[in-house]
Amino acid sequence: MAEVKLNFHKPSLRGEITVPGDKSISHRSIMFGSIAEGCTTVSGFLLGDDCLSTIDCFRKLGVKIELNGTDVVINSKGMNNWQEPLDILYTGNSGTTTRLMLGLLAGSNIHAILNGDASIGKRPMKRVITPLREMGAHITGRMDGQYTPLAIKGSQLKAIEYEMPVASAQVKSAILLASLQAEGTTIIHEKDISRDHTERMLRQFGADINVENGTISYKGGQKIHATHVNVPGDISSAAFFLVAGAMAEDSEIILRNVGLNHTRTGIIDVLQEMGANMDIIVDNEDAAEPTGTIIIRTSELVGITIDGDLIPRLIDEIPIIALLATKAKGKTVIRDAAELKVKETDRITAVVEELKKLGATIEATDDGMIIHGENQLRGASLKTYGDHRIGMMGAIASLLTDGSVKLDDADCIAVSYPTFFEDIKNII
Ligand code: SPQ
């Protein structure tokens, strides 16, 4: 594990960053390219460790995947011709790979074993196994399939009608991917809408999917056609620099190629409500996944309440939003976010503990946190808990504190943003 000492503090942050590919969309591009028979090409692919785990799993299923920089060429004989893997499918640190693979393999004609790292071993799988078993999936595993390692024997599935108990794109996507092979029309009801990249990509690959007022319907057995996928920049990665630009003195950062899918832009709503000085220029509103340029400047911020249906639209940005709130005037309350406890680490505990070390006035609640603003942050030695988003929160804090910030393990940042430290150098 690489320990790093960061002395980035600069009074002014200025420069441009082209945001690397979206992690959620990169995973799905490999999955859909492997399902479809023929040649799928991908540009702007994220070379993060999680997405490389997804590629590795599909190579083990016999799909030919070539990487050339951020371009990918996938040649597949179609999901009915996947090979039974000789080895376990190792999903590394990636919850998305693990859960979506379960959905895909459930209706296949092969047997496979899925396992990941220690963090994956603690993440709940029952939320995916329950609806998949209802569809007829044969899945066994530790504690009756609640945790990895998991064994799955593909079988004939039937469609279900399912009310989502939590707002989760991974659960929704696992069901949708299983429904590709299921007999009948699968219906999913979402109370709060989670990210919709799977639904958009199904359309891009030529499938007919109906989405209306939180209800999704998909008829199994449709043909998925190979195509080209252009992966936009990851707004969850851009978020770190949006916050840095708003918090630092005399700053202006231009972020290009930011994905602006409405189910992901909660961070923009929050920045605007807190009073951030920012401009957004939309490039292509009608693309499968819209993108744009965001210019963020030093801002006078006020505390706000973040809750309800906004939470799934910014769930991964909460660590960096908590850092932002330490500068705002007044109190920021984050609630309805208990899902944070089952991410790569318990992100409520991790954020509160590490921000306290930096001098923040912050307290944990059952489903979020309360941050009292206008704190002057100081240098400290921080733990990342092996969680990329906690690591990047600490690194951004080092841009804003007088003393240096030490991270016990910065390697985890490569999970979603392998060029993070190079991009920091573009703005200091
Ligand atoms: O893939 P993983 O490990 O679950 O990654 C995280 C992240 O911070 O990058 C969550 F820890 O993102 C999830 C996100 O929180 C990615 C995702 C997706 O691509 O479908 C959906 C969200 O999770 P969930 O459980 O709400 O569906």
Image (spheres, rainbow, N blue to C red):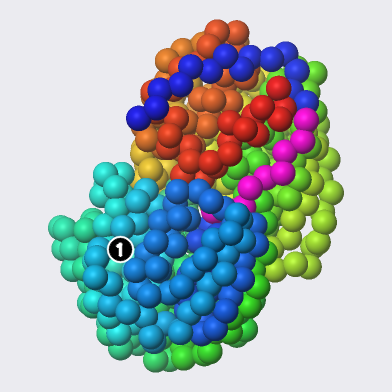
**Horizontal side, residue 11 vs residue 320: left or right:** right
Image height of 372 relative to 274, above or below: above
User: Which image quarter holds the C terminus?
Assistant: top right
Residue type pointed to by label 1: Leu
Which of the 4 quarters of the picture holds residue 307?
top right
Dividing the picture into quadrants, the one containing residue 87 is bottom left
Mark 1 vs ligand 1: CB under 8 Å? Answer: no
* Magenta extent: 15-23
Please tell me which residue is depicted at 65% across the width and 62% down the height of the picture: 43
Viewer-proximal residue among 123 and 327: 123
Q: How many marks?
A: 1
Q: Quadrant of residue 274?
A: top right
Residue 135 vs 251, above or below: the answer is below
Q: Which element carries disc 1, helix, strand or loop?
A: strand
Q: Which residue is at a point 62% across and 84% down the rendered structure image? A: 206
Say which residue label 1 marks: 89
- In the shown orientation, is residue 133 left or right of residue 410? left
Camera sees residue 301: no
The answer to if 159 sits in the magenta stretch is: no
Q: Is residue 329 left or right of residue 88?
A: right
Outermost residue on the left side: it is 143
Residue 216: image location, x then y, percent: 54, 76
Q: Quadrant of the N terminus?
A: top left
What is the crowding at mark 1: few (fewer than 14 residues within 10 Å), some, or many (at least 20)?
many
In the rendered view, does 184 fall on the left or right side of 11? Answer: left
> Whole-percent x and y of residue 320?
56, 33
Residue 255, can we see it?
A: yes
